Amino acid sequence: MAHPKHKISKQRRNKRRTHDKAVAPTLAACSNCNAQVQYHRVCPECGYYRGKLAIEKKVAV
């Protein structure tokens, strides 16, 4: 395995890794309640994922 010939400073290493950090997550509408949901996540409002109940939500009294 190759070994580095020079030390890479923390600042230089971190500059290289900054490119994709400022991207906002992609949102979609829930198919059950039309709330805004991140892709591949259970809806926090109704508990559905891909049209099926994933988490049983308590009803507010």
Image (cartoon, rainbow, N blue to C red):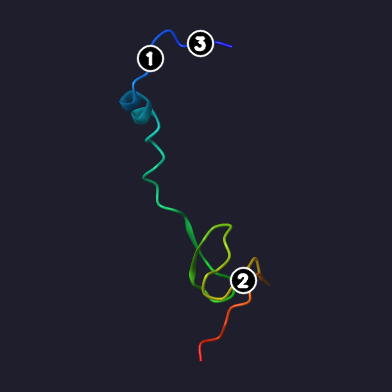
Instruction: Name the disc covering residue 48, or none.
Output: 2
Q: Residue at image x 37%, y 35%?
A: 18
Mark 3 → mark 1, Cα distance in angstroms = 10 Å
Instruction: Name the disc covering residue 7, or none.
Output: 1
Q: Earlier in the sequence, mark 3 or mark 2?
A: 3
Mark 3 surroundings: few (<14), some (14-19) or many (≥20) residues within 10 A: few
Q: Earlier in the sequence, mark 1 or mark 2?
A: 1
Mark 1 → mark 2, Cα distance in angstroms = 49 Å
Q: Position of residue 7 (x, y in %)?
A: 38, 14
Q: Position of residue 37 (x, y in %)?
A: 50, 64
Q: Position of residue 5 (x, y in %)?
A: 43, 7
The mark lying in front, picked from 3 and 2, is 3
* Amino acid type at mark 3: His
Q: Residue at image x 58%, y 65%?
A: 42
Front in this rendered view, residue 7 or 43: 7
Q: Which residue is mark 3?
A: 3
Q: Residue at image x 37%, y 18%?
A: 8
* Amino acid type at mark 2: Tyr
**Location of the N terminus (image quadrant):** top right
Task: Name the secondary structure under disc 3.
Answer: loop
* Amino acid type at mark 1: Lys
Mark 3 → mark 2, Cα distance in angstroms = 49 Å
Task: Name the secondary structure under disc 2.
Answer: strand
Q: Is residue 15 above or below residue 42?
A: above
Q: How many marks?
A: 3
Mark 2 surroundings: few (<14), some (14-19) or many (≥20) residues within 10 A: many
